[in-house]
Image (spheres, grey):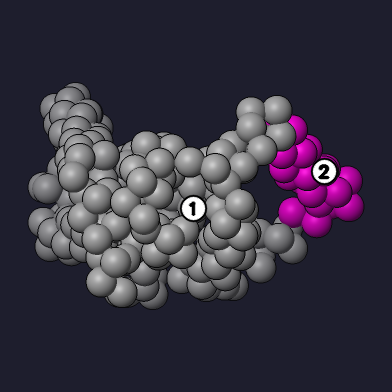
Amino acid sequence: MNRALNVVRLQLINRQTFLWLPLIILFGALGLSLLVYGIVAAAGAEGVKISGGAQAPLWYFGVVGAQALTRTFPFSQAMSITRREFFTGTLLTAGITAVLLSTIFVIGGLVEQATDGYGMNGYFFYMPWLWEAGPLAAGVTFFAVAMFFFVIGFWAATIFKRFGTLVLTVTLVGVSLLVVAIIGIVTITRSWPAVIEGGAALGAFGLAMWGLVLIAVLASSSFLTLRRATP
C-alpha cells in the first residue's frame, strides 16, 4: 500500500492535471453561468434556470485518465514500481480528485437551495433529478460519473500502450458501432418508453450504482491490458 501511495505522490507532482485544471474548469463554468443568470434576470425573465454546467470538468476527466497512463507510466517502471501498484495508485489519485469535486458539488447544491439559486433562481450544481435521493446520493452520483470518464480514458490509453494506434482506433469504432446498434434496436422495437421508465424508476442514484459496476469491469480490463503494456 505504501508503494501505491508513492504512485499517488508521483501523479500529483504535476498538480495541474489532477487538481488545478478540474477546479479551473468547474469554477470557470460556474462564473459563466452566474453571468448568464444575471443577464437573463436583468432582462426581466422569470422561472427556474438550470445550466448543468457542473458536468464540465467530468469530460476533462477522460483526458486525465489518458494522461495518467501515457505521461507517468514510463517513469513508474523506471522506479521499479509494479504495474499493480501503478494501477492501484493511479485509480486512488483519481478517486481523491473525484471525492474533492463531489464535495464541492454537494456544498454548491446546498448553497443554491438555501439561497434560491443565488437570488436569481439559477442553479448550477442543483438538478432536481440528481438530488431527489438527497445530498449524499447526489455526491455519489457525481463521483461515479467522474470515475467513469476517468476509467474510459485510462482504458483507451492502456489499449494504445499495448497494441498501438490502429487497434485503439478499431476498438473505438467498434464500440461506437455497438452503441449505435443498441440505439437502433431500441428505436426499431419502439422500446424507448420502457427504457425511459426504467431509468426513471432507478433514479440517478440507482443508475450510478450500475455505473460503478461498469467502472469495475472497465478497470479490470484495463489492468489485464496494462500487465502486458510496454512503457
Q: Nearer the viewer, residue 220 or 102?
A: 220
Q: Locate residue 33, reporting x and y percent.
A: 23, 34
Q: Which mark lies nearer to you, 2 or 1?
A: 1
Q: Is residue 183 above or below residue 201?
A: above
Residue 156 placement: quadrant: top right
| Residue 151 - label | 1
Segment tinted magenta in the rendering: 169-192
Whether residue 82 appears in this view of the structure is: yes
**Sooner in the amino-acid sequence: mark 2 or mark 1:** 1
Q: Is residue 164 above or below residue 113?
A: above
The residue depicted at 13 percent of the width and 59 percent of the height is 111
Q: Is residue 3 above or below residue 185?
A: below
Residue 92 placement: quadrant: bottom left
Left or right side of 135 for 65: right
Q: Locate residue 80, reporting x and y percent.
A: 36, 55
Under circle 1, the secondary element is helix
Residue named by callout 2:
181
Q: Is residue 188 magenta?
A: yes
| Type of amino acid under label 2 | Ala
Q: Locate residue 216, reporting x and y percent.
A: 55, 67
Classed neighbour count for the residue bearing mark 1: other residues with Cα under 10 Å, few (<14), some (14–19), many (≥20) = many
The residue depicted at 40 percent of the width and 49 percent of the height is 77
Classed neighbour count for the residue bearing mark 2: other residues with Cα under 10 Å, few (<14), some (14–19), many (≥20) = few
| Type of amino acid under label 1 | Val
Q: Nearer the viewer, residue 61 or 80?
A: 80
Whether residue 52 appears in this view of the structure is: no
**Quarter of the image containing the N terminus?**
bottom left
Residue 37 placement: quadrant: top left
The residue depicted at 80 percent of the width and 56 percent of the height is 191
Q: Is residue 155 magenta?
A: no
